[in-house]
Image (cartoon, rainbow, N blue to C red):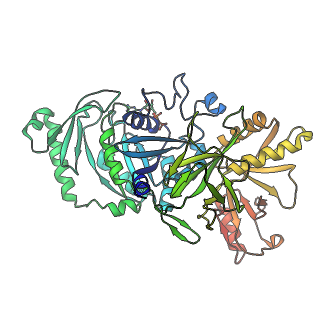
């Protein structure tokens, strides 16, 4: 029992999010280096060199040099067991990223110091805010000319509507990036020289240490003294509770590439980020320290290994301990089963697990019974975790098979890919599967879909883009579709569960629908 508590307490599960190119991969790699999980830089994602990334496994990723699917990286650091949920940086893969965030206990947001908050960060942030996920900010690339730090903090506060607390403060930027002042330890970490493998050598000095004045150029020394005074006068107390509620983001400055301030960030972050948090089920909150195993599925990935045509369901363990030979219940099907070959997946490396604890992510072979959001628990228990919301697609296309003889494969492929949640499928009201409307969050998903239909299911398809950009589920019970008063460019469809939806070409048509149909209830998410 004591072991269980200790194992769970020591786990930290978080996602790293950023706008593409802000430095997420570089920082992840540095974490893995410090933890001894990899030996050299360039192993995580070789998008700019010939080596394939550890976290890229799909053919299309290799072709395009982007990271499409998310993977999980586990390593130990200072006695803690760390699970990093790597999220695809490409903006078109936001849906997958959104779901991954549901499995994390906190998020690290990497921001480019010369750019501030960017479009993709904003979107991801909305999802974290929706769930009250604690957010830690790492302002990266301080070794380049950066925006004013006060301005950057203001940008985060205004753009994202969250408070900030600068845990450390940069001394200069670009070539004049000399170090950071750690406000919590009240000391200056003055960098002495770059070491691209490990954290850079640094001297730790008290702010009133006379050496400091000699170490910094005069103007930088004066700015630092002024900044420290200004910050301590600002009176914003560090409030860990507010951090855990997702209302206050601790901010760190550094440079992932040159290893400035990354390890100090990791250490502080690990102290502040919570151990596995309790998740809500229909019977109430489930305590992660409850010895009974429970988990929910947050991601399904088919054909990860082309030779085996397998399908893997990724689940986040929410309570207790998982052991390889134990029986568990899949609540949605009420089946008791033994999870087949539970594994930890680090991209192409798969390790069969004998045990795992709350906070961990495991992948299991899915014989086709799991769906995203499903719950697993002990055979004698019965509850379901809160579902994972389906995010509203923003692009739609009509899809047809070219060869009508391949109908079976067409239906199989399109349904399986939809079950994975990579696409959403809709149909004309009361029609068959000859023609399907596919909705995606980002247009690149169309290409991935087409590629996979052709390569994995051997079906050639033709896609015709549709002019819709907004979708709403109709929540009004017993709605009479024929009586709805809608603009001529609004389309009525249904999803695979038979629920009715409306596709709109613009916001204006949504307003029209609401104004001209009394009592009509529309929702952006299907739960
Ligand atoms: P991702 O798309 O967010 O995963 O970004 P990457 O980690 O792939 O980084 C994008 C580019 O920025 C790469 O060329 C990195 O070498 C570079 N980069 C990352 N961190 C830093 C940094 O701290 N300073 C500088 N100058 N470049 C960086």
- Asked whether 82 or 353 is in front, the reply is 353
Residue 72, placed above or below residue 358: above
Estimate the x, y position of residue 441 in percent, counting from the top left: 64, 49
Q: Tell which residue pokes out farthest to the top in this image.
A: 50
Q: Tell which residue pokes out farthest to the bottom in this image.
A: 518
Q: Quadrant of the C terminus?
A: bottom right
Number of numbered labels in the structure image? 0
**Residue 336 seen from this side:** yes
Estimate the x, y position of residue 145 in percent, counting from the top left: 33, 35
In the shown orientation, is residue 462 left or right of residue 503? right
Q: Tell which residue pokes out farthest to the right in this image.
A: 405
- Asked whether 60 or 309 is in front, the reply is 309
Identify the residue at horizontal 18%, vertical 58% (top origin): 233
Identify the residue at horizontal 74%, vertical 63% (top origin): 501
- Give the quadrant of ligand 1: top left
- Asked whether 482 or 376 is in front, the reply is 376
In the shown orientation, is residue 44 left or right of residue 434? left
**Residue 98 seen from this side:** no
In the shown orientation, is residue 114 left or right of residue 85? left
Where residue 450 sits, quadrant-wise, is top right
Residue 372, placed above or below residue 36: below
Identify the residue at horizontal 87%, vertical 44% (top origin): 408
Q: Tell which residue pokes out farthest to the left in this image.
A: 210
Estimate the x, y position of residue 163 in percent, counting from the top left: 35, 59
Where residue 482 sits, quadrant-wise, is bottom right
């Amino acid at each position: 029992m004591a072991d269980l508590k200790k194992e769970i307490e020591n786990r930290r599960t978080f996602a790293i999010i950023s706008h593409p190119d802000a430095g997420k991969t570089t920082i992840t790699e540095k974490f893995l280096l410090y933890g001894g999980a990899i030996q050299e830089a360039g192993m995580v994602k070789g998008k700019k060199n010939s080596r394939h990334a550890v976290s890229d496994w799909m053919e299309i990723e290799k072709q395009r040099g982007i990271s499409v699917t998310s993977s999980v990286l586990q390593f130990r650091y200072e006695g803690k067991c760390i699970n990093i949920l790597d999220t695809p940086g490409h903006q078109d893969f936001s849906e997958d990223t959104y779901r991954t965030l549901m499995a994390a206990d906190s998020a690290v947001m990497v921001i480019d110091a010369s750019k501030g908050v960017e479009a993709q960060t904003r979107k991801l942030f909305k999802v974290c805010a929706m769930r009250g996920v604690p957010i830690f900010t790492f302002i990266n690339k301080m070794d380049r000319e950066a925006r004013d730090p006060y301005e950057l903090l203001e940008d985060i506060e205004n753009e994202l509507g969250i408070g900030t607390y600068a845990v450390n403060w940069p001394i200069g930027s670009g070539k004049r990036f000399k170090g950071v002042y750690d406000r919590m330890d009240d000391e200056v970490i003055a960098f002495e020289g770059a070491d691209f493998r490990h954290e850079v050598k640094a001297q730790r000095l008290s702010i009133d240490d006379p050496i400091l004045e000699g170490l910094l150029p005069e103007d930088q020394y004066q700015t630092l003294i002024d900044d420290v005074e200004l910050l301590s006068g600002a009176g914003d107390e560090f409030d860990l509770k507010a951090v855990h509620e997702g209302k206050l983001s601790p901010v760190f400055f550094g440079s992932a590439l040159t290893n400035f301030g990354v390890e100090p960030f990791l250490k502080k972050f690990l102290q502040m980020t919570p151990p596995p948090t309790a998740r809500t089920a229909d019977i109430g909150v489930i305590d992660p320290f409850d010895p009974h195993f429970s988990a929910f599925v947050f991601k399904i990935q088919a054909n990860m290994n082309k030779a085996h045509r397998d399908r893997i369901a990724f689940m986040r363990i929410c309570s207790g301990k998982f052991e390889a030979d134990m029986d568990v219940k899949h609540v949605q099907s009420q089946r008791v089963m033994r999870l087949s070959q539970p594994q930890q997946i680090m991209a192409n490396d798969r390790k069969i697990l004998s045990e795992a604890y709350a906070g961990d992510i495991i992948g299991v072979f899915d014989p086709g019974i799991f769906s995203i959001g499903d719950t697993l628990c002990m055979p004698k228990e019965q509850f379901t975790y809160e579902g994972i919301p389906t995010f509203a697609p923003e692009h739609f296309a009509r899809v047809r098979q070219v060869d009508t003889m391949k109908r079976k494969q067409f239906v199989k492929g399109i349904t399986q890919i939809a079950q994975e949640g990579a696409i959403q499928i809709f149909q004309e009201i009361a029609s068959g599967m000859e023609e399907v409307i596919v909705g995606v969050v980002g247009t690149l998903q169309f290409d991935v879909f087409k590629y996979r239909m052709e390569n994995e299911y051997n079906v050639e398809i033709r896609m015709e883009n549709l002019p819709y950009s907004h979708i709403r589920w109709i929540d009004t019970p017993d709605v009479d579709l024929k009586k709805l008063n809608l603009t001529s460019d609004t389309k009525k469809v249904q999803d695979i569960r038979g629920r009715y939806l409306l596709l709109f070409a613009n916001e204006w048509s949504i307003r029209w629908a609401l104004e001209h149909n009394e009592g009509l209830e529309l929702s952006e998410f299907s739960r």
